[in-house]
Amino acid sequence: MNRFHACATCIYYRIEKRADGLYTYCRRLGYETKPNYRFNCWTPKPNVRRLMEKEEGKEESH
């Protein structure tokens, strides 16, 4: 896994404001999660994917 792999960088990660505070959850899996959790179903957000590709390009040029 790479350093970007975490729920907070996934397209399915959501945050809701509720009366009792913030609720963070996975829209795909349907249950509560935390920003730093990791699951195998991870799909990076477009901006994260670009960062990963940029870093990958730097590694290949060395």
Image (cartoon, rainbow, N blue to C red):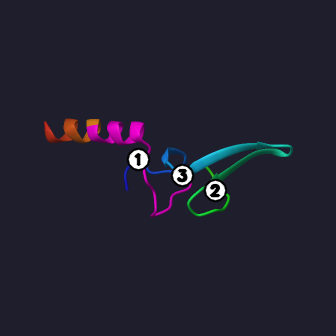
Q: Residue at x 66, y 62 (%)?
A: 31
Closer to the chain start, of discs 2 and 3, is: 3
Q: Position of residue 50 (x, y in %)?
A: 33, 37
43 magenta-colored:
yes
Q: Where is residue 21 in the image (x, y as percent from the top left)?
A: 80, 43
Q: Is residue 62 visible?
A: no
Q: Residue 12 carries which label?
A: 3
Q: Nearer the viewer, mark 3 or mark 1?
A: 3
Q: Which amino acid does label 3 sit on?
A: Tyr
Q: Which amino acid does label 2 sit on?
A: Thr
Judge left or right: residue 31 versus residue 28: right
Q: What residue type is labelled 1?
A: Arg
Spatial CA distance of label 3 from label 1 is 18 Å
Q: Which of 51 and 62 is in front in this view?
A: 51
Q: Give the range drawn in magenta.
A: 36-53
Closer to the chain start, of discs 2 and 1, is: 1
Q: Which residue is drawn at 56% across and 60% down?
A: 28
Q: Residue at x 49, y 49 (%)?
A: 10
**What residue would you read off at disc 1?**
3
**Quadrant of the drawing holding the C terminus:** top left
**What residue would you read off at disc 2?**
33
Label 2 residue SS: loop
Label 1 residue SS: loop
Spatial CA distance of label 2 from label 1 is 18 Å
Residue 48 vertical position relative to residue 25 in the rendered view, above or below: above
* Numbered-mark total: 3
Q: Residue at x 15, y 41 (%)?
A: 60
Count neighbours of disc 1 (C-alpha within 10 A) and say few if under 14, some if 14 to 19, many if 20 or more. few
Residue 30 vertical position relative to residue 16 in the rendered view, above or below: below
